[in-house]
Image (cartoon, coloured by chain):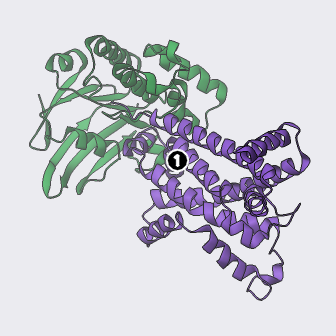
Chain colours: A green, B purple
Amino acid sequence: MGLELEIIHVFRSYNGNPILRDCSFAFAGGRTYVLQGPNGSGKSTLFRTLALLEKSDSGRVEYRDGGRILAADLALRRRITLVLPRTGIFNTTVFKNVAYGLKIRGVSRAEIEARVNDALLAVGLGHKKWQRASELSSGETKRLGIARAMVINPEVFMLDEPTANIDSANTAIIEDIILKMRQDRQAIILMITHDPAQAQRLGDDLLLMQDGKIIPA
Amino acid sequence: MQSIIEGFAAAFRLIVTLNPELWRIILLSLEVSGTALMLATVLGLPVGAFLALRRAPLRGLVISLLNTGMGLPPVAAGLFLYLFLSRSGPLGFIGLLYTPTAMIVAQCILAFPIVASLSHAAIANVDPVIRQAAITLGATPIQESLAVVREARYSILAGVMAGLGRVMAEVGAIIIVGGNIAGYTRVMTTTIALETDKGNFELAIALGIILLTISFSITVALRFFQRLGQGGTSGN
Protein backbone atom coordinates (compact mmCIF):
# COMPACT_ATOMS: atom_id res chain seq x y z
CA MET A 1 0.00 0.00 0.00
CA GLY A 2 1.66 3.24 -1.14
CA LEU A 3 0.98 6.86 -0.48
CA GLU A 4 -2.45 8.32 -1.05
CA LEU A 5 -2.83 11.93 -2.02
CA GLU A 6 -5.79 14.23 -1.73
CA ILE A 7 -6.19 17.93 -2.32
CA ILE A 8 -9.07 19.35 -0.31
CA HIS A 9 -10.81 22.67 -0.98
CA VAL A 10 -7.60 24.47 -1.90
CA PHE A 11 -7.65 28.15 -2.83
CA ARG A 12 -4.56 29.93 -4.15
CA SER A 13 -4.27 33.36 -5.72
CA TYR A 14 -1.41 35.53 -6.97
CA ASN A 15 -1.69 39.31 -6.60
CA GLY A 16 -5.43 39.03 -6.19
CA ASN A 17 -5.86 36.73 -9.22
CA PRO A 18 -7.48 33.47 -8.13
CA ILE A 19 -5.65 30.49 -9.64
CA LEU A 20 -6.91 27.51 -7.65
CA ARG A 21 -10.55 27.85 -6.62
CA ASP A 22 -11.93 25.29 -4.23
CA CYS A 23 -9.79 22.64 -5.88
CA SER A 24 -10.42 19.12 -4.60
CA PHE A 25 -9.38 15.72 -5.89
CA ALA A 26 -8.25 12.36 -4.54
CA PHE A 27 -5.41 10.54 -6.33
CA ALA A 28 -5.25 6.78 -5.91
CA GLY A 29 -1.98 4.86 -5.61
CA GLY A 30 -0.56 3.09 -8.66
CA ARG A 31 -2.42 5.22 -11.19
CA THR A 32 -1.16 7.68 -13.77
CA TYR A 33 -3.03 10.97 -14.02
CA VAL A 34 -2.53 13.28 -16.96
CA LEU A 35 -3.60 16.86 -16.48
CA GLN A 36 -4.45 19.15 -19.37
CA GLY A 37 -5.70 22.70 -19.58
CA PRO A 38 -4.92 26.05 -21.14
CA ASN A 39 -1.89 28.14 -20.14
CA GLY A 40 -2.54 30.02 -16.94
CA SER A 41 -5.26 27.63 -15.79
CA GLY A 42 -3.27 26.72 -12.66
CA LYS A 43 -1.78 23.36 -13.61
CA SER A 44 1.75 24.24 -12.50
CA THR A 45 0.46 25.98 -9.37
CA LEU A 46 -1.45 22.83 -8.53
CA PHE A 47 1.68 20.68 -8.97
CA ARG A 48 3.83 23.05 -6.91
CA THR A 49 1.20 22.97 -4.17
CA LEU A 50 1.02 19.16 -4.28
CA ALA A 51 4.83 19.00 -4.19
CA LEU A 52 4.78 21.17 -1.02
CA LEU A 53 6.81 23.86 -2.79
CA GLU A 54 4.01 26.37 -2.22
CA LYS A 55 1.45 26.88 0.47
CA SER A 56 -2.21 27.30 -0.32
CA ASP A 57 -4.21 30.31 0.90
CA SER A 58 -6.76 27.93 2.37
CA GLY A 59 -7.66 24.26 2.16
CA ARG A 60 -5.05 21.52 2.46
CA VAL A 61 -2.98 18.89 0.69
CA GLU A 62 -3.20 15.61 2.50
CA TYR A 63 -0.78 12.72 2.13
CA ARG A 64 -1.88 9.50 3.80
CA ASP A 65 -0.09 6.24 4.41
CA GLY A 66 -2.32 3.35 5.43
CA GLY A 67 -5.04 5.81 6.37
CA ARG A 68 -2.70 7.86 8.60
CA ILE A 69 -2.31 11.54 7.66
CA LEU A 70 1.36 12.44 7.25
CA ALA A 71 2.93 15.71 8.41
CA ALA A 72 4.33 17.90 5.61
CA ASP A 73 7.91 17.42 6.80
CA LEU A 74 11.22 16.39 5.28
CA ALA A 75 10.39 12.68 5.60
CA LEU A 76 7.30 13.19 3.45
CA ARG A 77 9.08 15.49 0.99
CA ARG A 78 11.61 12.72 0.44
CA ARG A 79 8.86 10.34 -0.70
CA ILE A 80 7.56 12.66 -3.42
CA THR A 81 9.13 14.64 -6.24
CA LEU A 82 8.33 17.08 -8.99
CA VAL A 83 10.28 17.42 -12.24
CA LEU A 84 10.05 21.14 -12.93
CA PRO A 85 9.38 22.44 -16.47
CA ARG A 86 12.76 24.23 -16.38
CA THR A 87 14.55 21.25 -14.97
CA GLY A 88 17.02 23.07 -12.69
CA ILE A 89 20.02 21.03 -13.75
CA PHE A 90 23.14 21.62 -11.64
CA ASN A 91 26.31 22.92 -13.27
CA THR A 92 28.25 19.68 -12.91
CA THR A 93 28.44 16.26 -14.57
CA VAL A 94 25.45 14.19 -15.60
CA PHE A 95 26.41 11.56 -12.98
CA LYS A 96 26.59 14.06 -10.11
CA ASN A 97 23.23 15.52 -11.07
CA VAL A 98 21.56 12.15 -10.78
CA ALA A 99 23.53 11.23 -7.65
CA TYR A 100 22.41 14.39 -5.81
CA GLY A 101 19.15 13.07 -4.35
CA LEU A 102 20.88 9.93 -3.09
CA LYS A 103 23.89 11.75 -1.70
CA ILE A 104 21.77 14.10 0.42
CA ARG A 105 19.98 11.02 1.80
CA GLY A 106 23.31 9.57 2.93
CA VAL A 107 23.20 6.59 0.56
CA SER A 108 26.52 4.68 0.32
CA ARG A 109 28.86 5.40 -2.57
CA ALA A 110 28.55 1.90 -4.02
CA GLU A 111 24.75 2.03 -3.98
CA ILE A 112 24.77 5.52 -5.51
CA GLU A 113 27.00 4.27 -8.32
CA ALA A 114 24.69 1.31 -9.06
CA ARG A 115 21.42 3.24 -8.85
CA VAL A 116 22.67 6.20 -10.88
CA ASN A 117 23.92 3.84 -13.58
CA ASP A 118 20.52 2.13 -13.72
CA ALA A 119 18.66 5.45 -13.91
CA LEU A 120 20.95 6.78 -16.64
CA LEU A 121 20.55 3.58 -18.64
CA ALA A 122 16.77 3.83 -18.25
CA VAL A 123 16.74 7.31 -19.82
CA GLY A 124 19.37 6.48 -22.45
CA LEU A 125 22.11 8.68 -21.03
CA GLY A 126 24.48 5.96 -19.80
CA HIS A 127 27.10 6.95 -22.34
CA LYS A 128 27.03 10.59 -21.24
CA LYS A 129 27.62 9.89 -17.57
CA TRP A 130 30.79 11.97 -17.22
CA GLN A 131 29.79 14.72 -19.60
CA ARG A 132 28.95 18.15 -18.18
CA ALA A 133 25.18 18.55 -17.95
CA SER A 134 25.43 21.95 -19.64
CA GLU A 135 26.59 20.19 -22.83
CA LEU A 136 23.37 18.17 -23.20
CA SER A 137 20.64 19.02 -25.69
CA SER A 138 17.21 20.21 -24.51
CA GLY A 139 15.73 16.73 -24.85
CA GLU A 140 18.64 15.10 -23.03
CA THR A 141 18.34 17.71 -20.27
CA LYS A 142 14.67 16.76 -19.80
CA ARG A 143 15.67 13.10 -19.64
CA LEU A 144 18.37 13.92 -17.11
CA GLY A 145 15.76 15.69 -14.97
CA ILE A 146 13.60 12.56 -15.06
CA ALA A 147 16.56 10.29 -14.20
CA ARG A 148 17.47 12.54 -11.28
CA ALA A 149 13.94 12.21 -9.90
CA MET A 150 13.52 8.50 -10.76
CA VAL A 151 16.64 7.45 -8.91
CA ILE A 152 15.15 8.38 -5.53
CA ASN A 153 12.19 6.03 -6.10
CA PRO A 154 9.46 8.55 -5.34
CA GLU A 155 6.03 7.30 -4.35
CA VAL A 156 4.40 10.34 -5.92
CA PHE A 157 6.11 11.34 -9.17
CA MET A 158 5.01 14.63 -10.72
CA LEU A 159 6.20 15.78 -14.14
CA ASP A 160 5.36 19.30 -15.28
CA GLU A 161 5.36 19.27 -19.09
CA PRO A 162 8.18 16.72 -19.49
CA THR A 163 8.02 16.83 -23.28
CA ALA A 164 7.51 20.57 -23.87
CA ASN A 165 9.80 22.17 -26.48
CA ILE A 166 11.67 19.02 -27.46
CA ASP A 167 11.84 17.01 -30.67
CA SER A 168 9.74 13.95 -31.47
CA ALA A 169 12.58 11.49 -30.90
CA ASN A 170 13.16 12.72 -27.36
CA THR A 171 9.41 12.88 -26.77
CA ALA A 172 9.13 9.21 -27.76
CA ILE A 173 11.95 8.26 -25.38
CA ILE A 174 10.34 10.15 -22.49
CA GLU A 175 6.95 8.57 -23.20
CA ASP A 176 8.59 5.14 -23.08
CA ILE A 177 10.21 6.00 -19.74
CA ILE A 178 6.84 7.06 -18.30
CA LEU A 179 5.10 3.95 -19.65
CA LYS A 180 7.79 1.78 -18.08
CA MET A 181 7.43 3.63 -14.77
CA ARG A 182 3.70 2.89 -14.91
CA GLN A 183 4.40 -0.81 -15.20
CA ASP A 184 7.24 -1.05 -12.71
CA ARG A 185 6.13 1.14 -9.85
CA GLN A 186 3.23 1.43 -7.49
CA ALA A 187 3.72 5.19 -7.49
CA ILE A 188 1.13 7.83 -8.21
CA ILE A 189 2.30 9.45 -11.44
CA LEU A 190 0.98 12.88 -12.33
CA MET A 191 1.94 14.72 -15.46
CA ILE A 192 0.96 17.83 -17.35
CA THR A 193 0.80 17.91 -21.12
CA HIS A 194 -0.74 20.02 -23.87
CA ASP A 195 -0.86 17.05 -26.26
CA PRO A 196 -4.23 15.22 -26.10
CA ALA A 197 -2.87 12.19 -27.98
CA GLN A 198 0.00 11.89 -25.51
CA ALA A 199 -2.47 12.16 -22.63
CA GLN A 200 -4.41 9.23 -24.11
CA ARG A 201 -1.24 7.18 -24.57
CA LEU A 202 0.10 7.70 -21.06
CA GLY A 203 -2.76 8.30 -18.67
CA ASP A 204 -5.04 5.97 -16.71
CA ASP A 205 -7.08 9.01 -15.80
CA LEU A 206 -7.33 12.15 -17.87
CA LEU A 207 -8.01 15.34 -15.99
CA LEU A 208 -8.76 18.89 -17.03
CA MET A 209 -7.93 22.06 -15.18
CA GLN A 210 -10.84 24.43 -15.54
CA ASP A 211 -11.81 27.51 -13.51
CA GLY A 212 -9.18 26.60 -10.92
CA LYS A 213 -10.65 23.14 -10.38
CA ILE A 214 -9.72 19.61 -11.44
CA ILE A 215 -12.42 17.88 -13.45
CA PRO A 216 -12.30 14.48 -15.19
CA ALA A 217 -11.70 15.03 -18.93
CA MET B 1 67.01 54.40 -23.00
CA GLN B 2 70.35 52.69 -22.35
CA SER B 3 69.72 52.67 -18.58
CA ILE B 4 66.29 51.09 -19.08
CA ILE B 5 67.80 48.29 -21.21
CA GLU B 6 70.55 47.76 -18.64
CA GLY B 7 67.95 47.76 -15.88
CA PHE B 8 65.93 45.02 -17.63
CA ALA B 9 69.07 42.97 -18.33
CA ALA B 10 70.11 43.15 -14.68
CA ALA B 11 66.56 42.34 -13.59
CA PHE B 12 66.45 39.18 -15.77
CA ARG B 13 69.82 38.15 -14.30
CA LEU B 14 68.33 38.45 -10.80
CA ILE B 15 65.34 36.32 -11.79
CA VAL B 16 67.30 33.67 -13.67
CA THR B 17 70.02 33.34 -11.03
CA LEU B 18 67.34 32.89 -8.35
CA ASN B 19 68.66 35.84 -6.35
CA PRO B 20 67.97 35.00 -2.66
CA GLU B 21 66.84 38.48 -1.70
CA LEU B 22 64.43 38.62 -4.64
CA TRP B 23 62.91 35.24 -3.76
CA ARG B 24 62.66 36.07 -0.05
CA ILE B 25 60.62 39.16 -0.96
CA ILE B 26 58.42 37.21 -3.39
CA LEU B 27 57.77 34.44 -0.88
CA LEU B 28 56.89 36.90 1.89
CA SER B 29 54.51 38.70 -0.50
CA LEU B 30 52.79 35.44 -1.38
CA GLU B 31 52.64 34.39 2.27
CA VAL B 32 51.15 37.71 3.44
CA SER B 33 48.66 38.06 0.58
CA GLY B 34 47.78 34.35 0.53
CA THR B 35 47.05 34.27 4.27
CA ALA B 36 45.09 37.55 4.08
CA LEU B 37 43.03 36.21 1.21
CA MET B 38 42.38 32.92 2.97
CA LEU B 39 41.13 34.76 6.05
CA ALA B 40 39.05 37.14 3.92
CA THR B 41 37.48 34.13 2.16
CA VAL B 42 36.77 32.25 5.40
CA LEU B 43 35.05 35.38 6.76
CA GLY B 44 33.65 36.88 3.56
CA LEU B 45 32.07 33.85 1.90
CA PRO B 46 29.69 33.01 4.77
CA VAL B 47 28.74 36.69 5.06
CA GLY B 48 28.05 36.90 1.31
CA ALA B 49 26.11 33.62 1.37
CA PHE B 50 24.06 34.68 4.38
CA LEU B 51 23.14 37.99 2.75
CA ALA B 52 22.16 36.25 -0.49
CA LEU B 53 20.17 33.41 1.06
CA ARG B 54 18.44 34.97 4.08
CA ARG B 55 16.27 38.04 4.45
CA ALA B 56 18.14 39.45 7.44
CA PRO B 57 17.41 42.88 8.96
CA LEU B 58 19.68 45.72 7.71
CA ARG B 59 20.62 43.50 4.77
CA GLY B 60 20.50 46.38 2.28
CA LEU B 61 22.67 48.56 4.50
CA VAL B 62 25.28 45.82 4.97
CA ILE B 63 25.41 45.17 1.20
CA SER B 64 25.86 48.92 0.57
CA LEU B 65 28.66 49.07 3.16
CA LEU B 66 30.40 46.08 1.57
CA ASN B 67 30.10 47.61 -1.89
CA THR B 68 31.61 50.82 -0.51
CA GLY B 69 34.36 48.79 1.14
CA MET B 70 35.35 47.38 -2.26
CA GLY B 71 36.66 50.82 -3.15
CA LEU B 72 38.27 51.49 0.23
CA PRO B 73 41.54 53.38 -0.39
CA PRO B 74 44.39 51.19 0.94
CA VAL B 75 46.13 54.21 2.44
CA ALA B 76 43.03 55.04 4.48
CA ALA B 77 42.71 51.42 5.62
CA GLY B 78 46.40 51.46 6.58
CA LEU B 79 46.02 54.72 8.45
CA PHE B 80 43.07 53.54 10.56
CA LEU B 81 44.71 50.22 11.30
CA TYR B 82 47.90 52.07 12.26
CA LEU B 83 45.93 54.23 14.72
CA PHE B 84 44.49 51.08 16.30
CA LEU B 85 47.79 49.19 16.44
CA SER B 86 50.16 52.04 17.38
CA ARG B 87 51.50 52.00 20.92
CA SER B 88 48.98 54.65 22.06
CA GLY B 89 46.09 52.98 20.14
CA PRO B 90 43.41 50.71 21.64
CA LEU B 91 45.14 47.56 20.34
CA GLY B 92 48.69 48.80 20.84
CA PHE B 93 49.30 46.35 23.70
CA ILE B 94 49.27 43.41 21.22
CA GLY B 95 52.46 44.70 19.64
CA LEU B 96 51.50 43.92 16.06
CA LEU B 97 52.62 47.11 14.37
CA TYR B 98 55.46 46.65 11.86
CA THR B 99 54.99 42.87 11.69
CA PRO B 100 53.84 40.63 8.82
CA THR B 101 50.73 39.88 10.91
CA ALA B 102 49.72 43.56 10.79
CA MET B 103 50.17 43.45 7.00
CA ILE B 104 47.97 40.35 6.82
CA VAL B 105 45.27 42.11 8.86
CA ALA B 106 45.49 45.18 6.60
CA GLN B 107 45.17 43.14 3.43
CA CYS B 108 42.37 41.07 4.93
CA ILE B 109 40.45 44.30 5.61
CA LEU B 110 40.89 45.25 1.94
CA ALA B 111 39.99 41.83 0.52
CA PHE B 112 37.06 41.04 2.84
CA PRO B 113 34.51 43.42 1.24
CA ILE B 114 35.50 42.22 -2.24
CA VAL B 115 35.11 38.54 -1.39
CA ALA B 116 31.89 39.09 0.61
CA SER B 117 30.30 41.41 -1.94
CA LEU B 118 31.20 39.35 -5.01
CA SER B 119 30.15 36.13 -3.25
CA HIS B 120 26.84 37.75 -2.40
CA ALA B 121 26.33 38.81 -6.03
CA ALA B 122 27.35 35.37 -7.32
CA ILE B 123 24.97 33.49 -5.02
CA ALA B 124 22.10 35.95 -5.44
CA ASN B 125 22.38 35.53 -9.23
CA VAL B 126 21.89 31.76 -9.17
CA ASP B 127 18.67 30.83 -10.98
CA PRO B 128 15.93 30.28 -8.34
CA VAL B 129 15.00 27.02 -10.11
CA ILE B 130 18.20 25.46 -8.69
CA ARG B 131 16.94 25.93 -5.15
CA GLN B 132 13.52 24.58 -6.10
CA ALA B 133 15.09 21.56 -7.80
CA ALA B 134 17.09 20.81 -4.65
CA ILE B 135 13.87 20.99 -2.58
CA THR B 136 11.99 18.68 -4.95
CA LEU B 137 14.84 16.17 -4.63
CA GLY B 138 14.53 16.14 -0.84
CA ALA B 139 17.13 18.64 0.35
CA THR B 140 17.07 19.99 3.90
CA PRO B 141 17.25 23.81 4.20
CA ILE B 142 21.03 23.61 4.70
CA GLN B 143 21.50 21.21 1.77
CA GLU B 144 19.36 23.48 -0.37
CA SER B 145 21.53 26.51 0.52
CA LEU B 146 24.68 24.50 -0.17
CA ALA B 147 23.31 23.51 -3.58
CA VAL B 148 22.85 27.18 -4.43
CA VAL B 149 26.33 28.13 -3.15
CA ARG B 150 27.86 25.20 -5.06
CA GLU B 151 26.16 26.42 -8.20
CA ALA B 152 27.85 29.81 -7.72
CA ARG B 153 31.27 28.30 -6.97
CA TYR B 154 33.05 29.48 -10.10
CA SER B 155 31.75 33.03 -9.74
CA ILE B 156 32.76 32.94 -6.07
CA LEU B 157 36.25 31.79 -7.10
CA ALA B 158 36.38 34.66 -9.57
CA GLY B 159 35.58 36.99 -6.65
CA VAL B 160 38.36 35.44 -4.58
CA MET B 161 40.78 35.93 -7.47
CA ALA B 162 39.67 39.57 -7.72
CA GLY B 163 40.47 39.88 -4.01
CA LEU B 164 43.91 38.38 -4.62
CA GLY B 165 44.52 40.87 -7.42
CA ARG B 166 43.64 43.69 -5.07
CA VAL B 167 45.93 42.64 -2.22
CA MET B 168 48.89 41.59 -4.37
CA ALA B 169 49.01 45.01 -6.03
CA GLU B 170 48.40 46.96 -2.84
CA VAL B 171 51.13 49.13 -1.31
CA GLY B 172 49.49 51.93 0.71
CA ALA B 173 48.22 49.95 3.68
CA ILE B 174 51.11 47.55 4.18
CA ILE B 175 53.78 50.22 3.96
CA ILE B 176 52.06 52.06 6.83
CA VAL B 177 51.45 49.07 9.14
CA GLY B 178 54.39 46.94 7.99
CA GLY B 179 57.05 49.64 7.90
CA ASN B 180 58.91 48.14 4.93
CA ILE B 181 61.61 46.59 7.14
CA ALA B 182 64.25 44.77 5.06
CA GLY B 183 64.13 41.00 5.47
CA TYR B 184 61.07 41.18 7.71
CA THR B 185 58.14 43.16 6.29
CA ARG B 186 59.45 44.15 2.87
CA VAL B 187 57.26 42.75 0.11
CA MET B 188 57.19 43.17 -3.67
CA THR B 189 55.16 46.36 -3.93
CA THR B 190 56.89 48.17 -1.07
CA THR B 191 60.31 47.14 -2.39
CA ILE B 192 59.47 48.47 -5.84
CA ALA B 193 58.39 51.79 -4.31
CA LEU B 194 61.54 52.00 -2.17
CA GLU B 195 64.08 50.87 -4.79
CA THR B 196 62.59 53.19 -7.43
CA ASP B 197 62.90 56.04 -4.95
CA LYS B 198 66.54 55.14 -4.41
CA GLY B 199 67.22 54.81 -8.13
CA ASN B 200 68.07 51.05 -7.85
CA PHE B 201 66.02 49.88 -10.78
CA GLU B 202 67.32 46.28 -11.18
CA LEU B 203 65.48 44.82 -8.20
CA ALA B 204 62.45 47.06 -8.81
CA ILE B 205 62.18 45.96 -12.46
CA ALA B 206 62.68 42.28 -11.57
CA LEU B 207 59.90 42.48 -8.97
CA GLY B 208 57.78 44.48 -11.40
CA ILE B 209 58.08 41.69 -13.97
CA ILE B 210 57.17 39.07 -11.36
CA LEU B 211 54.23 41.16 -10.15
CA LEU B 212 52.98 41.65 -13.71
CA THR B 213 53.27 37.90 -14.31
CA ILE B 214 51.26 37.20 -11.17
CA SER B 215 48.64 39.81 -12.18
CA PHE B 216 48.42 38.25 -15.62
CA SER B 217 48.00 34.78 -14.10
CA ILE B 218 45.25 36.10 -11.81
CA THR B 219 43.47 37.63 -14.81
CA VAL B 220 43.72 34.35 -16.75
CA ALA B 221 42.41 32.40 -13.74
CA LEU B 222 39.61 34.94 -13.28
CA ARG B 223 38.53 34.57 -16.87
CA PHE B 224 38.74 30.77 -16.64
CA PHE B 225 36.48 30.66 -13.58
CA GLN B 226 34.04 33.14 -15.13
CA ARG B 227 33.77 30.97 -18.23
CA LEU B 228 33.20 27.85 -16.14
CA GLY B 229 30.48 29.72 -14.26
CA GLN B 230 28.79 30.70 -17.50
CA GLY B 231 28.72 27.01 -18.45
CA GLY B 232 25.95 26.55 -15.89
CA THR B 233 22.52 25.48 -16.96
CA SER B 234 19.23 25.45 -15.18
CA GLY B 235 17.52 23.38 -17.86
CA ASN B 236 15.07 24.28 -20.53
For the residue pair B231 and B75, the one nearer the viewer reads as B75
Residue at mark 1: B149
Dividing the picture into quadrants, the one containing residue B182 is bottom right
Question: How many numbered marks appear?
Answer: 1
Q: Determine whether, in the image, residue A117 is placed left or right of residue A43.
A: right
Can you say whether B1 is above or below A202 in the image? below
Whether residue B144 can be seen here = yes
Dividing the picture into quadrants, the one containing residue B127 is top left
- Quarter holding the C terminus of chain A is top left
Q: Residue at x 20, y 38 (%)?
A: A43
Dividing the picture into quadrants, the one containing residue B126 is top left
- Quarter holding the N terminus of chain A is top left
Q: Determine whether, in the image, residue B68 is placed left or right of residue B157.
A: left
Can you say whether A23 is above or below A149 in the image? below
Residue B9 position in % (x across, y down): 79, 40
For the residue pair B154 and A152, the one nearer the viewer reads as B154
User: Which chain contains the residue that carries disc 1?
Assistant: B
Residue A116 position in % (x across, y down): 54, 22
Q: Residue at x 51, y 45 (%)?
A: B155
For the residue pair A76 and B17, the one nearer the viewer reads as B17
Whether residue A105 can be seen here = no
Can you say whether A49 is above or below A153 in the image? below
Residue that protrudes farthest toward the front in the picture:
B2
Q: Residues within 10 Å of mark 1 (few under 14, many from 20)?
A: many
Q: Determine whether, in the image, residue A59 is placed left or right of residue A149.
A: left
Residue A177 position in % (x across, y down): 36, 16
Can you say whether B29 is above or below B185 in the image? above
Q: Amino acid at mark 1?
A: Val
Residue that protrudes farthest toward the bottom in the picture:
B88
